[in-house]
Image (cartoon, rainbow, N blue to C red):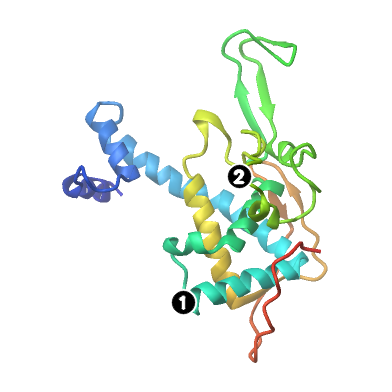
Amino acid sequence: MSRLIDHRRAVHRDDSPHTVADLLNTARDEGALTPQGATGIIVANLFAAHESTAAALAWLLLLLDRHPRVRRQVRDEADRELAGRLPTAADVPCLTVTASVVTETLRLYPPLWLIERTVEEPTELAGYPLRPGQRVAVSPFVLQRDPRHYHQPTAFRPERWRDRSPADPLPKYAFMPFGGGPRTCLGTRFATAAMTITTATLISSYQITRTPGTTPVFRTRTILQPHHLTLDITDHPPGPRPRPHPTGTAD
């Protein structure tokens, strides 16, 4: 990683698009980061995003098993847009159905289900006085199931993200699976792109179902995980594909 960052410093031109490495190199030049610190930020993001992304994908695959109509929509989209090849980051904007499944999964089962902060200065929140040293928590899991902002808030409805009008935006913090404000997770774009690409790849090639007799339960030790979840993965059966199912509300 250090070699890649140094190589980027050597070849970057001011008129070329900026990358995370460019921002880190600028911080190094300004003395805000050491070379080791810059490398550590990228490595931490790559590894930190994997556990939360894996947990979210597990929830996603469980939801698709429960909603076969949506699973067919994801597979039809992959067949149509990818034509049998593996997806790349460049394909993400075309995978709108898959992306909406990812977003709806993150709404229902955000890996970062509880966010805590420590009070530094005396303040007041909703009429409650807070003292320095006290801890305050907010739960995206609760916020993202608020009936004031979501119709059928506990239902898995990916189309809500495709049908929502730009003239009717959500409140700023009604959807925050990666946190919010200046401390929003730096891996947000990486994680959502990785989930979209992985979902399209898996669903287009395999039949993934929950193993009979297994009952997943919440594990909330650090991130929200489906504990005791086991999935069976098999190749799609040979033969003609069924006709694409029109996009619509999941049962």
Q: Which mark is residue 251?
A: none
Figure label count: 2
Q: Could you tell me which secondary element the residue under label 2 belongs to?
A: loop
Q: Position of residue 102 (x, y in %)?
A: 61, 56
Judging by the rendered image, the residue that carries numbered circle 1 is 85
Compared to residue 168, the image places residue 90 above or below, namely below
Compared to residue 108, the image places residue 213 above or below, namely below
- What residue is shown at x 39% (from left), y 39% (from top)? 41
Q: Could you tell me which secondary element the residue under label 1 belongs to?
A: loop
Q: Position of residue 243 (x, y in %)?
A: 68, 82
Q: Position of residue 214 (x, y in %)?
A: 79, 64
- What residue is shown at x 79% (from left), y 46% (from top)? 151
Q: Position of residue 184 (x, y in %)?
A: 52, 35
| Amino acid on which the number 1 mark rests in the picture | Arg
Q: Nearer the viewer, mark 2 or mark 1?
A: 2
Compared to residue 204, the image places residue 6 above or below, namely above
Neighbor class of circle 2 (other Cα within 10 Å; few <14, some 14-19, many 20+) is: few
Residue that lies at the very extreme toward the front in this rendered image? 167
Quadrant in the picture for residue 215: bottom right
In front of the other: 56 or 69: 69
Cβ–Cβ below 8 Å for labels 2 and 1? no
| Amino acid on which the number 2 mark rests in the picture | Pro
In front of the other: 149 or 75: 149
Q: Which comes sooner in the sequence, label 2 or label 1?
A: 1
Neighbor class of circle 1 (other Cα within 10 Å; few <14, some 14-19, many 20+) is: few
In front of the other: 31 or 176: 176
Q: Which mark is residue 166?
A: 2
Q: CA distance from mark 2 to mark 1?
A: 33 Å
Quadrant of the rendering where the C terminus is positioned: bottom right
Q: Is residue 7 visible?
A: yes
Q: Is residue 158 visible?
A: no
Quadrant in the picture for residue 204: bottom right
